[in-house]
Structure formats: structure tokens, C-alpha cells
Image (cartoon, coloured by chain):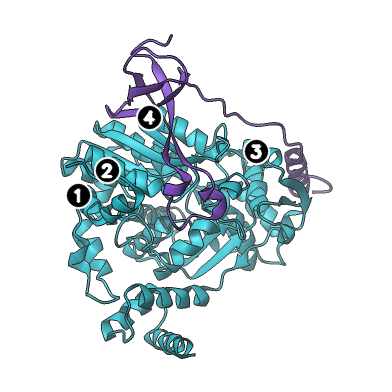
Chain colours: A cyan, B purple
């Protein structure tokens, strides 16, 4: 019998397609209420740290160097109050085979796919993950399809995404490019059904566990070189896997630095809008992913996401687009390092955050990404200017995403904006109750929500009461 | 005429505006969901024809033939002179003047 392939019918087959393509029965971890056993899911379907290291090192992933940015630290100190300005470091993840930390996620996902006997892998991504999966699939001898949201309705592609398509193809993948819209997921499901390939989702336990090696390496390398763990780790936050995996790896090393998430502010731009698509000057690492995925992780392409950043974040800050471009340029001009702008989101934040800390403290930015045509400060700013975005020097606080890009007229103007984590925690609790239609959460639910939000059971109870009062109004 | 076996790019509409997801914003709903993919042409054809291709993973797709030996044209964009000012200023703060 011919299957119906209209939007509603395909979405209706989602659970069945997912089970076949990920090979995880998520129902095993469910409690029947809000709570699910996150750690059990990570344990039973993931890999131990040692196994992951062996998998990654065997395919030349990981063990990337940590670089101290002495000139950028000096520039931060020139802008900071007397005695302030922590030493700034970056982990040069661009040194991975595919040019970003995503190689770690892909190495595990592809290893797992091969072990289970899948002939190929599919990833839905417009980011560096595509090239990472393509690279790992090439090594493993598996076929690879990458599905991208790339063009607006006029056929104009985001230069950053076009470059990523090129790289995927260079690594032997089939790239399926789509125009703007969340129905990318629809085509993704159809492809999984058609090919029977493995869903190399960014959000499975294997993918997230793959990043744990990054956090673990930071601690080990720091201890070896500087005799201690870093005081602060800054992670660019989009889907949440980077931050989640890094924080888990640090904890496995027994390190407990402050974990700060950072996203480029794209406030006011609708992510599924055809018109807004090419008004963005960043296609990842931004608040359009970072805020919704942190507030509600289970909006991804798997039933339960292994990326749960609110469990691990101590602070979450945003930074203006112009400030990230400014730091990207400064990294080249003062440190002799050309890296991709999106990966420098956390660096721009760290430049400001270092100025809050004493000079004997250390702050590490846990990634860099490769750069090249389309994916570089020059073409991304040029593209913005061609799209009518004004580029000017001034105070970054006056930047309006989609209207202008403000390059700081002095580095001392480069500041982060604090995101209200309590507001996100409340939102997560509200969404959990609504999604699972639970009016009286169980004790297990309350403990779970406290873990989910890195808060306390008291905080969760107070929020549940507030939600009830709100509903009765 | 483009020969069977040539490397081409095709375009197709996979959801018309009426068929799109209910949650998409109005400006996106006004336009179709489009797809572009590359592969080997299965039979001789002309640009603009409806054709079948075989992709590098061995999948068959159909669509309108739009390019032969498609290539990338993305680059480093037009020059942004502001970047020179950033370099000059940061170097001046660190290494310039009386320092």
C-alpha cells in the first residue's frame, strides 16, 4: 500500500520513524508523568568516557590544544578596573578533522550507527555538524545525507550555510537544500523512511556524551599545564549540547568551574520567517536556538533530548552580533588566529566576563571553528550590508538585530547582557506541566524539575503554586 | 542537450503554500517549500525539463533540471573597510603610543 506523504501523515508517523532510525526505545526511561530518568538514559544508551575517548582518538578527533590569548587578555585588562582581567584561553576545536567540536558528537553517532549495522547516516543541520557527520561517515565508509535550511524564497543563500554545504559535499555527502521553514523536519523524516539510514541527531545520548571528552580534556590539560582547573568555562549555546556535554565532562574530571552559556542576540527576528532569514548575520550560536532549547529541550528531533543546558548553566549571557565580529577580527589581528565568527560568540562574552574577575583567575572558551569563504567576518558583514543592514561604529547596546550591526567604537564598550535564568526555569516548569498535562506533580516530578532547572524543590513547589494561582484567575 | 550521466542540480517544490505546516508565519506560508539537490542525470534532457537523477548516496529524485556541473560562487564578499579601523585601534591600545 502506498504511504501518504502529505505533511500531517508524515508527522503522524514520527514516533515510528524515530524508533527505527535512532534505535532507542525512549519509553524505557519514562515515569508516566513529567519525570524521566535522564541519567539512566545517558548510561544505557551512551558510552563511558573511556570508550568515547578511544572511539574519538581512533578517528583523529579530540586532544585539541588549549591556547592562551595573551594579547586579548592584555586588551581586556586595558579596559578593566585596576587588578581585574582574568587570563583568557581558548580550546582550539577547529583543529578537529571537520573543523569544529562537532566532530566529537559525529564520531560517536557514526560509530554507533555502524555498530548497529546501518548503511548510512542522516543529519538535519545547517551548521558545522553536517561536515562533522560527513567527515566521520567518510572514515567509516557509510553513506551520508545532510539536510539544510539554506535559501530564502528568492533563492538567496546564507553564505555561512552555502559554505557548509560545500564542505559536506567535499567530504562525500549528499546535501539536500531547502528553503526556509520548520518543515525541514518533514523532509528529514521522509528521507529516514526512504533510506532506512541512522538518524545522527544532535540530541541523542551518544552525540551529547561525545562532547564529554571536551570538558574532560579541558580539566586534564589545565591541570597538567597550570596545576589547577579553570575558574570559568564559557560555552556558545544554541541547541544546548555543547554546554551540556562540556559540563558533564568537567564533572567527570571532578572539576567544578562556573559554567556560563553565551549566545548572539537575535532578539526580535523570527526564526521561521522567510523575510527575516537573510537579515540574520549569524546562523547558529544565537538566541533563536539558545533560548527556546534551554527553556524547553524536548523540542528537538528526538523524544527526549540528551542536551539539557539548564541543568548545568550557572549564568547565561547574550552578546551583540557586532561585538562577536569585532572579537573575531581582533583574534586575527592581535593573536594571529583566523577562526569562524559563530564559534567566537563565547570568546566575545569571555572578553567582557574576564573583566569582572581578578587577574589571577582563568577563563576558558571551549571552542573555535574553521573559517573560509562565506564563513568569515568579511563575507558575513558584506552580506549584511547587501541586505540593507547598516554597519556602523557605536555602542553595542544600541544594536537592533535585522536593522544594524554595531561594531564597538572602543573595546571597553563590549559587554554581555544577563539572561534571567529564573525566568527560564519558571518557563520550563510551566511547559513541563502543560506538555504532560499534569496538575499535581509527583514527588519524583518535583525532584526531577529541581534537577532540570538546577534549582531546589522549594523553588519548583513555589512555581507550581504560582502556576495554579495563574490558572485559577 | 545534456547527456545522461552528467552531474546536475535539480529544483522542486515539495510543499505548496496550501500544504505547509500550520505553525509557519504568514510570510513563509505565502511561498512554497523548495528543494535543491545534485546528482547524475538518468536520461538525456534540456535545462528546464522534468528529470530524474541519482544522488551520490544512490537515491532517486525528480525535479526540474536547472544546472549542469553546478559550482559554488560564495566568496569573501565586498571589502569592509571598518575592519581596518578595528585592527588599528586595538593595536594602538596594546602596542602604540608611549607603551
Q: Secondary structure at mark 4?
A: loop
Q: Which residue, given by chain and number where applicable, does mark 1 sit on?
A: A20
In this view, the residue farthest toward the front is B18
Q: Which residue, given by chain and number where applicable, does mark 3 sit on?
A: A383
Q: Which residue, given by chain and number where applicable, does mark 2 sit on?
A: A192
Name above or below for residue A434 compared with residue A167. below
N-terminal of the pair, mark 2 or mark 3, is 2
Q: Chain of mark 2?
A: A
Residue A348: % across, % down: 61, 54
Residue A334: % across, % down: 66, 43
Task: Look at the image and tell me whether residue A232 can be seen.
Answer: no
Local crowd size for mark 4, using a 10 Å CA cut-off: few (<14), some (14–19), many (≥20): many
Name above or below for residue A437 compared with residue B38. below
Q: Which residue, given by chain and number where applicable, does mark 4 sit on?
A: A171
N-terminal of the pair, mark 2 or mark 1, is 1
Q: Chain of mark 4?
A: A
Q: Nearer the viewer, mark 2 or mark 3?
A: 2
Q: Secondary structure at mark 1?
A: helix
Residue for point 25% across, 37% down: A120
Work out how far the residue at label 3 is from the one at label 1, CA to CA, in angstroms: 41 Å
Q: Quadrant of residue A377?
A: top right
Work out how far the residue at label 3 is from the one at label 4, CA to CA, in angstroms: 26 Å
Q: Secondary structure at mark 2?
A: helix
Q: Are marks 4 and 2 in contact (CB under 8 Å)?
A: no
Work out how far the residue at label 4 is from the one at label 1, CA to CA, in angstroms: 26 Å
Work out how far the residue at label 4 is from the one at label 2, CA to CA, in angstroms: 20 Å
N-terminal of the pair, mark 3 or mark 4, is 4
Between A4 and A142, the one lying in front of the other is A4
Q: Secondary structure at mark 3?
A: helix
N-terminal of the pair, mark 3 or mark 1, is 1
Q: Are marks 2 and 1 in contact (CB under 8 Å)?
A: yes
Amino acid at each position: 500500500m502506498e504511504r501518504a506523504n502529505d505533511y500531517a501523515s508524515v508527522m503522524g508517523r514520527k514516533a515510528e520513524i524515530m524508533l527505527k532510525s535512532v534505535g532507542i526505545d525512549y519509553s524505557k526511561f519514562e515515569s508516566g508523568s513529567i519525570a524521566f530518568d535522564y541519567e539512566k538514559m545517558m548510561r544505557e544508551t551512551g558510552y563511558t568516557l573511556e570508550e568515547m575517548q578511544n572511539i574519538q582518538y581512533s578517528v583523529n578527533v579530540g586532544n585539541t590544544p588549549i591556547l592562551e590569548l595573551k594579547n586579548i587578555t592584555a586588551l581586556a585588562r586595558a579596559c578593566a578596573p585596576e587588578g581585574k582581567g582574568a587570563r583568557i584561553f581558548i580550546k582550539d576545536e577547529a583543529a578537529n578533522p571537520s573543523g569544529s567540536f562537532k566532530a566529537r558528537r559525529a564520531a560517536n553517532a557514526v560509530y554507533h550507527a555502524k555498530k548497529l549495522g546501518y548503511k548510512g547516516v542522516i543529519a538535519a543541520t545547517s551548521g558545522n555538524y553536517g561536515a562533522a557527520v560527513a567527515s566521520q561517515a567518510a572514515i567509516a565508509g557509510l553513506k551520508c545525507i545532510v539536510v539544510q535550511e539554506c535559501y530564502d524564497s528568492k533563492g538567496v543563500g546564507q553564505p555561512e550555510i552555502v559554505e557548509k554545504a560545500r564542505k559536506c559535499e567535499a567530504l562525500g555527502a549528499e546535501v539536500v537544500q531547502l528553503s526556509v521553514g520548520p518543515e525541514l523536519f518533514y523532509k528529514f523524516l521522509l528521507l529516514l523512511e526512504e533510506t532506512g539510514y541512522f538518524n545522527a541527531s544532535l540530541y541523542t545520548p551518544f552525540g551529547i556524551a561525545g562532547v564529554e571528552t571536551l570538558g574532560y580534556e579541558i580539566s586534564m590539560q589545565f591541570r597538567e599545564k597550570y596545576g589547577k582547573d579553570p575558574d570559568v568555562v564559557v560555552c556558545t549555546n544554541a541547541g544546548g549540547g555543547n554546554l551540556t556535554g562540556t559540563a558533564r565532562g568537567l564533572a567527570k574530571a571532578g572539576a567544578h568551574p562556573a559554567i556560563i552559556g553565551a549566545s548572539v542576540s537575535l532578539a526580535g527576528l523570527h526564526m521561521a520567517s522567510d523575510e527575516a532569514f537573510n537579515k540574520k548575520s549569524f546562523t547558529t550560536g544565537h538566541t533563536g536556538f539558545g533560548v527556546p532549547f534551554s527553556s524547553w529541550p524536548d523540542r528537538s528531533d528526538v523524544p527526549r533530548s540528551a542536551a539539557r543546558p539548564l541543568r548545568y548553566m550557572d549564568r547565561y549571557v547574550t552578546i551583540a552580533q557586532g561585538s562577536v565580529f569585532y572579537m573575531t577580527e581582533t583574534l586575527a589581528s592581535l593573536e594571529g588566529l583566523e577562526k569562524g565568527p559563530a564559534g567566537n560568540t563565547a570568546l566575545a562574552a569571555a572578553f567582557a566576563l574576564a573583566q569582572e574577575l581578578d587577574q589571577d583567575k582563568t577563563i576558558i572558551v571551549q571552542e573555535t571553528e574553521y573559517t573560509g569563504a562565506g564563513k568569515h567576518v568579511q563575507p558575513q558583514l558584506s552580506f549584511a550590508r547587501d541586505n540593507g543592514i547598516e554597519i556602523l561604529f557605536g555602542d553595542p547596546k544600541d544594536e537592533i538585530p535585522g536593522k544594524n550591526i554595531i561594531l564597538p567604537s572602543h573595546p571597553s564598550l563590549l559587554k554581555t547582557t544577563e539572561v534571567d535564568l529564573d525566568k527560564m526555569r519558571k518557563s520550563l516548569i510551566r511547559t513541563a506541566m502543560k506538555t504532560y498535562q499534569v496538575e499535581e506533580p509527583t514527588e519524583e516530578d518535583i525532584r526531577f524539575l529541581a534537577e532540570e532547572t538546577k534549582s531546589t524543590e522549594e523553588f519548583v513547589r513555589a512555581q507550581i503554586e504560582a502556576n495554579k494561582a495563574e490558572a485559577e484567575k | 542537450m545534456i547527456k545522461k550521466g552528467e552531474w546536475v542540480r535539480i529544483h522542486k517544490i515539495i510543499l505548496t503554500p496550501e500544504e505547509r505546516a500550520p505553525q509557519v508565519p504568514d510570510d513563509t506560508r505565502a511561498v512554497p517549500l523548495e528543494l535543491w539537490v545534485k546528482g547524475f542525470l538518468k536520461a538525456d534532457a534540456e535545462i528546464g525539463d522534468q528529470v530524474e537523477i541519482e544522488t551520490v548516496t544512490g537515491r532517486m529524485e525528480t525535479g526540474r533540471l536547472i544546472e549542469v556541473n553546478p559550482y559554488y560562487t560564495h566568496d569573501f564578499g565586498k571589502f569592509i573597510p571598518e575592519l581596518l579601523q578595528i585592527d588599528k585601534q586595538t593595536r594602538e591600545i596594546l602596542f602604540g603610543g608611549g607603551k
